[in-house]
Image: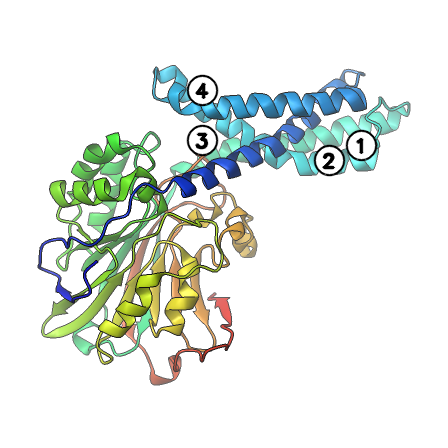
Amino acid sequence: MSGRRREATLSPVTASRRTFGRGGRLALRNARVSALFIAAGSEALIAEWVLRAAGHSLGLMGFAAAVFALAAANAATLVALPRVARGARAGYVFGRVWLVASVAALVTGPPLAAVFALFGPLVWLGPSSDGVGATLLVSAGGAAVALGFGSIFWGYLVGQRRVEIDRIELPLPGLPAALAGLRVVQISDLHIGLQLRAPLLRELVARVNALEADLVVITGDVFDFDPSFIEEGCRELAALRAPMGVFCVLGNHDVYTGADAVAAGLGHFTKIRVLRDEWVVLELAGAKLALAGVEDTGQGWSERDATHAALARLAREIPAGLPRLLLIHRPSYFEQAARLGFPVALAGHTHGGQIALPGPGRHHNVSRLISRWTRGLFRDEVSGALLYVNRGLGVAGPPVRLNCAREISLLRLVQAPESAFAAPPAAGQALLVRPVA
């Protein structure tokens, strides 16, 4: 791995390469199987509600047997799904609908369980002898099922097709006057593959170019497991344009795809510069900005407190008087970056959860399991360091987005007042990171 500074105009570096992360893929697969097993309980509960509406019941033993049978069926389908989806068009459609229905069942389960707990004791799972209780159970259960399936299928048919352009102003300490107002477009988590093919990718690239940014950055997960899509995706990404260049770091899914293959494809088919644990100097009208980027390790993808071995080296190498902007894939690197004196970091990884509560509840989503900071702008109250987490342009797993549209970030760099930033937190001093309204 190169420890030397490289100018932005040089050819891509030949840093040390990482191989396929089997551990990361296994962890991801286990998480999906666990979610589907939990979904089996929700599916069995929905079946019980249907039977209750018809005056019947699974009974306690029947309910337990249904949960295990559905879990086994879910696991078998999960294993077969990649092969089925890559076959006929019908297989791909089946896979998408099955994933969406599974998520809908998972979301429906908790409110439906609450209905059973209130109106027809869930423990016994027997037909209610009380006509009023039975009516309330069926009616309230129907509302829960309609809400769960209705919201998720809206997220599939409508929500995941929405693309929002979020405009954010980022103060950067030491930013020269010549670079004040610099427009940076950030995109992330495209997951190019079966769920993002060339036609849609072409439209997204056109929307990015229409913003006429000075600089474009991609914060990881460009591809999604399958290296056979690298050429197709790179040929579309080659159309990205920005006067100061297009830069990229690799995410955990790029490691699963094959980090070397992804970097080679981007180098061969595009002019995108991949930053593999290195930094470059960008210059405009004599003013300079250091752009640093670290490549995801592909391991421990769900760690909420992660560190990266290259960050300390990069922090040492960049001259103290040079303003710096850091590209990372996973937000969990932010704490280490802030301690090392990086004032602004851009990240992705979380997809904003893809499914989130509306309004102020948007930070409460499933991605909280893997990151403390899931979407939007965050500030460390101790040092003033900023983190922006992009919601991504693609989807992973179920093609659903609810209260969480795809995102293109248009970031405007501005000069920071002296009072906005302080010295990096001292060793042992806790960060106080809060979302910025």
Q: Mark 3 = which residue?
A: 157
Residue 38 place in picture, x, y as percent: 62, 34
Specify the amino acid type for callout 2.
Ala
Mark 3 to mark 4 CA distance (whole Å): 15 Å
Specify the amino acid type for callout 4.
Phe
Say whether residue 149 is visible. Answer: no
**Residue under the image location 39 percent in, 41 percent down:** 162
Mark 1 to mark 4 CA distance (whole Å): 32 Å
Mark 4 to mark 2 CA distance (whole Å): 28 Å
Mark 2 to mark 3 CA distance (whole Å): 26 Å
Numbered label attached to residue 211: none
**Foreground of the two, 240 or 359:** 240
**Residue under the image location 64 percent in, 26 percent down:** 43
Q: If the image is split into quadrants, where does the N terminus sit?
A: bottom left
Callout 2–callout 3 Cβ contact below 8 Å: no
Residue 227 place in picture, x, y as percent: 26, 33
Mark 1 to mark 2 CA distance (whole Å): 7 Å
Q: Residue furthest right?
A: 129
Q: Mark 4 = which residue?
A: 94
Callout 4–callout 2 Cβ contact below 8 Å: no
Q: Mark 2 = which residue?
A: 113
Mark 3 Cα within 10 Å, few/some/many (few <14, many 20+)?
A: some
Q: Secondary structure at mark 3?
A: helix
Q: Secondary structure at mark 1?
A: loop
Q: Residue furthest bottom?
A: 418
Callout 1–callout 2 Cβ contact below 8 Å: yes
Nearer the observer, disc 2 or disc 3? 2
88 over 401 or under it: above or below: above
